[in-house]
Image (spheres, rainbow, N blue to C red):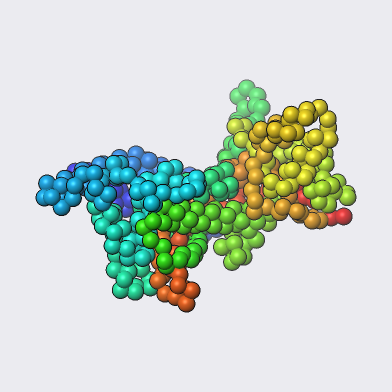
Amino acid sequence: MLKNSQEIRDEISEQRIKAQAIVDVAKAEERDLSEDEQSSFDQLVDLADALESNDLVRAEKREDLEAKAKQAMKLQAKVDAGDIQLGSESGEVQNNFSVPVRAKSSRKLQAYDNERDAYVAGNVILANVFGNHKATQFCNDLGIGLRNAHVEAQDPKGGFLVPEEMQRSLIRLREERGVFPQYARNYPMASDSLFVPRDINDQTAYWVGENTEITESDADLGGAELIAKKLACLSKVSSELDEDSVVDIAEMVTRSMAYAMADKIDEAGFNGTGTSTYGGVTGLASALNASAINDAASGNVSSATLDLADFQNTAAILPEYSGSNNVWFMHKQVYWEAVCRTQLAQGGSTGAEASNGLGQPMLFGYPVVFTQVMPNSPGVSTICAYFGDLSLAATVGTRRAVRTQVSVDRYFENDMIGIKCTERVAINVHERGDSIRTRPIVALKTAAS
């Protein structure tokens, strides 16, 4: 008998709990895993990964097809009974309805690929948050579950399911906006804490003579602990919105929440100090060892005084890693004031290049990635740029995807509705550069004076 997705998730969780128990025992006894324990740990993790990437994916696809088939039968039954007519605004299947002209946005959408997805998401918000009857009927006809359909009863702690269209856009926008998760290693988490493997040191090779015993060496393996923390943002929405604003409602709420969550994760990953302000995350700025930080030349105390030699010396302390994908991370203003300024000063640029731009920002043959959470106008002794492969230095874990809740009375005096968005994520900068082997990313700091 085929297992359903929940049964497979339970089995994945069971395997990971067993693997975690092995690590916990060794950790409590303040020792490394034995050979047998490491083998058992690897087998459990491999089994959980295989279940997640194969069995769970197949089960979810199968259940999705079954759900769509049931929904199609439900809609057809309504058509046969004369309750709805194909072609009517409220009776269309998701791929067939048309967005009413009055609801179309006058601006180019950023959060959604098309107006139909935004229209679906907006109707879910309109139905759940504002109790709009027409939006509720639209959602019911499409088979979209409404968790908080009784919002008119003034339930201040109600929540609603994020529709698939909104979920996709939230994830896409967060990934496009957020830099740290894009370039760090990513892990799904089946529990609030998870140890992910990390290779600290390689085995040692020796020259040996004939009939000489070979010196034994072991790879130094370790783990990086991911502890999921709740991240949340709260938006205020006018209570006077109606169906004519459906597309703009979805666009505004989705973009606002996605950008807020992405920026907060980036702030923790790059700037975290381990305090509650950053969810307890110690980011690159505080995690990197002094040997992984290059101080700019004396007098180079800002982006206006940095020179190419400062960036060159930073690149020089990054060791070569096979298969690494190195990039530069910095604020856009630092790039234009420091990097572009010094590059143009080298000469050789044409008027057309200066006018039309140089395409993908590059420095010494490596891409420059802008992250707006880094200092835009760094002062003395401030890290202003990173260089290296973030996927080898840090891991981001996802415990739970986006969840939303609404409050109809939090901003009662302002005649507004509160929409809260939460998720559970973990960030660990585990390679901090205290040795050459653990230095996949380095930093440039402005001079002290």
Q: In this view, does 191 lie to the left or right of 227?
A: left
The residue most toward the front is 102
Q: Residue at x 68, y 52 (%)?
A: 374
Q: Residue at x 50, y 53 (%)?
A: 255
Query: Which quadrant would the C terminus be assigned to in this image?
Result: bottom right
In front: 176, or 435? Answer: 176
Res. 58 in view: yes
Q: Where is residue 55 in the image (x, y as percent from the top left)?
A: 31, 41
Q: Nearer the viewer, residue 19 or 336?
A: 336
Q: Residue at x 19, y 47 (%)?
A: 85
* Left or right: 120 in relation to 220: left
Please indicate, yes or no, whether residue 159 appears anywhere in the rendered image. Answer: no
- The foreground one among 415 and 221 is 415
Task: Identify the residue at image location x=55%, y=48%.
Answer: 177
x, y percent for residue 90:
26, 51
- Say which quadrant the N terminus sits in: top left
Q: Horizontal placement of 224 versus 150: left or right?
A: right
Residue closer to the observer: 396 or 264:
264
Against 216, is 386 above or below?
below
> What is the total number of numbered labels drawn onto the structure image?
0
Vertical comparison of 104 with 27: above or below: above
Residue extending furthest toward the left: 81
Q: Name the quadrant containing residue 259.
A: bottom right
Report x, y in % for residue 304: 82, 48
Image location of residue 222, percent across then percent down: 55, 48
Q: Residue furthest bottom?
A: 413
Residue 210 as seen in the image, left or right of residue 334: left
